Every structure is written in C-alpha cells, then in structure tokens.
C-alpha cells in the first residue's frame, strides 16, 4: 500500500470528499490539532448545511459556524481557552437561533464515536443520569429521524442484568460521512501517527465513511514502521492525505508548535463584532489562495516563538497572555 491516488492538496480533498449537507466530525480538541487547512478550504469553497459532530472543539468549529457553513451540530463543548471560554461565533449563532444544537457530555460523545467505530447501533453507560443532558433536548421534535438526526437524543432504561430500578443511558452511535483530522506524521504507506493525546480522533476515523488527514510530515515507510506501537491508524482507513506543515495553526500540534496566542487574541477581538469577523474571513481565508498563502501573511517572529521544544513538545517560554 502507498499514497498513490491519496496524496492531494486541501482543495482537491475538499472538492472530492466533503459535500454540502454532510455530517462532518472534526479531530483535535479546543486549542490542539484542529484541521485548519481543510476547514479554511471548506469555507473558501462555500460548503453549506453541514452537520457537525464534535467531541469538544475550538477555532476550526467556530470558523465554520461563523462563516455560515453549519446548520446543525452535536457537541460537548466549544471553546478556545482563555481567548474564548465559549467560542464566540458559535455562541452567537445559538443565541440567534441560526444553529440547531444538541449537547452531550465529553464522555458521552466519546462513547458515541466508539459505538460507531465498533459497528454498534447504540452504547450503554451510567454517565449523565439525573442531569439536564438527559432531561432536556435541543433538536426540534419534527427533525427526529430525518437524515442522520437520531430518532431520540438518548434513552434511559432498566439494566437487564441487574435488579429492577438500576438505570442505564443508551446513546445512539455516530457514523459521520467524513472525518477530518491533523496528525504529526503520515508514512508513505499511509500509516498515520498522532503524537501526544489523540482525544476522540481515532474513534471518529474508524466510525466515518471517509477520512481526510492533514499532516506536518510525510515520512518513509521504513521510518513509520519503527516503533509501530506509536502509530494510530492504518493506511487503508484513510481516503486523502494532505501534506500541510503548520496545518493546525493557530492551534497547537504537539512536538511541532504551540498555539499562537497573538493570532488567537486578535481573532477573539474581531469575532465579537459581525463586521470585524467578516473582515477576518476576507483577510485570512477568502483573501488567501490556499493555506500556504494564509501562513505567508503571518508574522515570522510569531511563528518562531511558537516552535515547540523537541523534548517537551510545547514552547515553554511562550507569552500566553
């Protein structure tokens, strides 16, 4: 197995594999490993009516929602640390009634992707009992059972293996149309290696119909097969590979670069105002031919400051204010 037919640009990957109305899962977590190069391209290509399903997410999700690409979402949490404890355009869209939203806990979303990866229709858990996550729903009842919208948010029932009165929560599985993720390395045989925390990326990839991976490096097959216990996904699960150094910016990619506080602070200031947010999109996304063009607009000194220590995996002296 090799990358023949799979290695492509972000533009080609989005054109071929991401369609209007798709259910899309985003890999990464808040300020870490967001698949930014693919998300920029989705916005440039004007994808619409997307149905996002995320564990917890940040900048990539907020941009897609703010750009009007998303109509429906299931998520545990959306935030960018101190720069936006709740993602700004995401919050604005919910408050304005522009986004249909269903919320689950982090653990519940992880379990739902795990169920999808295992080919199960549902998964049982104890988490969430006696909480508003179980007691309240976000989606319109008229939408239930339409497309990929679950017939019910969840079901609380009796544990058939325990005495009467012992309750469990049954969660519907997730099987996205397409999963997007950013990894540190992909081998020339297609093997994906994620270094550091993988969050729910691996379950999302195994549950999805199509998988797009951007990466910092493409390395020889012989290198990726060293320390095979460090590898994350086999090549046969991946439909497209995009070589995208700094492809998670302004979020972090462990061992390569930290998050960019300068850019995230600027984004947070612009995102609170509708006109300023449109200027952000025009300058950084619509005004860029591709992600490489976006990166060329950044301050080289800022990129130098976020370079990760090769041992620690992050930038220890970074001013994060």
Image: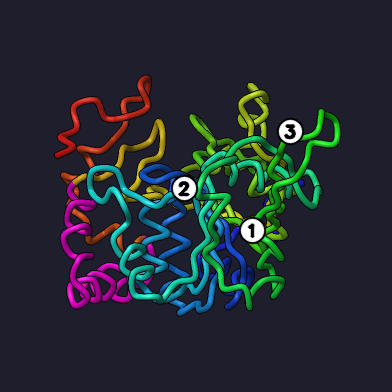
Residue sitting at 36 percent across and 44 percent down? 31
Q: Which mark is residue 56?
A: 2
Residue sitting at 45 percent across and 79 percent down? 46
Question: Is tag 3's residue or tag 2's residue first in the polypeptide sequence?
Answer: 2
Give the residues in magenta. Answer: 262-291
Would you say residue 2 is visible in this rendering? no
- In the rendered image, which quarter contains the C terminus? top left
Looking at this view, name the residue that lies furthest to the front: 164
Q: Position of residue 29 (x, y in %)?
A: 44, 44
Left or right of 230? Residue 88 is left
What secondary structure is found at the residue carrying circle 2?
Answer: strand
Residue sitting at 71 percent across and 66 percent down? 151
- The mark lying in front, picked from 3 and 2, is 3
Would you say residue 301 is visible in this rendering? yes
Please say if the residues under marks 3 and 2 sit with CB atoms less than 8 Å apart.
no
Magenta includes 266? yes
Q: Is residue 240 above or below residue 158?
A: below
Question: Is tag 1's residue or tag 3's residue first in the polypeptide sequence?
Answer: 1
Marks 1 and 3 sit apart, C-alpha to C-alpha, by 20 Å
- The mark lying in front, picked from 1 and 3, is 3
Q: Which residue is mark 3?
A: 166
Q: Is residue 18 above or below residue 29?
A: below
Q: Position of residue 273 (x, y in %)?
A: 18, 71
Marks 2 and 1 sit apart, C-alpha to C-alpha, by 18 Å
Q: Which mark is residue 153?
A: 1
């Amino acid at each position: 197995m090799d990358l023949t037919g799979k290695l492509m640009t972000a533009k080609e990957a989005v054109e071929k594999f991401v369609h209007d109305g798709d259910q899309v899962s985003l890999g990464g977590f808040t300020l870490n490993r967001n698949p930014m190069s693919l998300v920029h391209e989705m916005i440039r290509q004007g994808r619409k009516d997307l149905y996002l399903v995320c564990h917890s997410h940040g900048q990539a999700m907020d941009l897609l929602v703010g750009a009007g690409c998303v109509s429906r979402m299931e998520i545990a949490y959306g935030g960018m640390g101190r720069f936006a404890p709740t993602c700004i355009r995401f919050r604005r869209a919910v408050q304005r009634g522009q986004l249909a939203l269903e919320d689950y806990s982090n653990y519940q979303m992880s379990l739902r992707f795990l169920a999808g990866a295992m080919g199960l229709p549902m998964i049982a858990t104890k988490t969430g009992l006696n909480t508003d996550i179980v007691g309240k729903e976000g989606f319109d009842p008229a939408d239930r059972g339409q497309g990929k919208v679950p017939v019910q948010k969840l079901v609380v029932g009796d544990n058939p293996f325990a005495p009467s009165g012992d309750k469990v929560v049954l969660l519907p599985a997730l099987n996205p149309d397409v999963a997007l993720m950013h990894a540190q390395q992909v081998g020339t045989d297609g093997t994906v290696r994620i270094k550091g925390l993988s969050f729910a990326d691996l379950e999302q990839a195994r549950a999805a119909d199509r998988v797009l991976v951007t990466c910092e490096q493409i390395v020889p097959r012989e290198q990726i097969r060293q320390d095979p216990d460090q590898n994350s996904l086999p090549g046969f699960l991946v439909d497209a590979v995009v070589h995208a150094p700094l492809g998670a910016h302004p979020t972090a990619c462990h061992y390569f670069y930290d998050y960019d506080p300068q850019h995230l602070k600027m984004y947070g200031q612009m995102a609170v105002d509708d006109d300023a947010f449109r200027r952000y999109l025009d300058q950084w996304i619509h005004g860029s031919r591709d992600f490489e063009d976006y990166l060329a607009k950044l301050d080289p000194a800022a990129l130098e400051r976020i370079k990760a220590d090769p041992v620690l995996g992050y930038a220890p002296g970074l001013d994060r204010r």
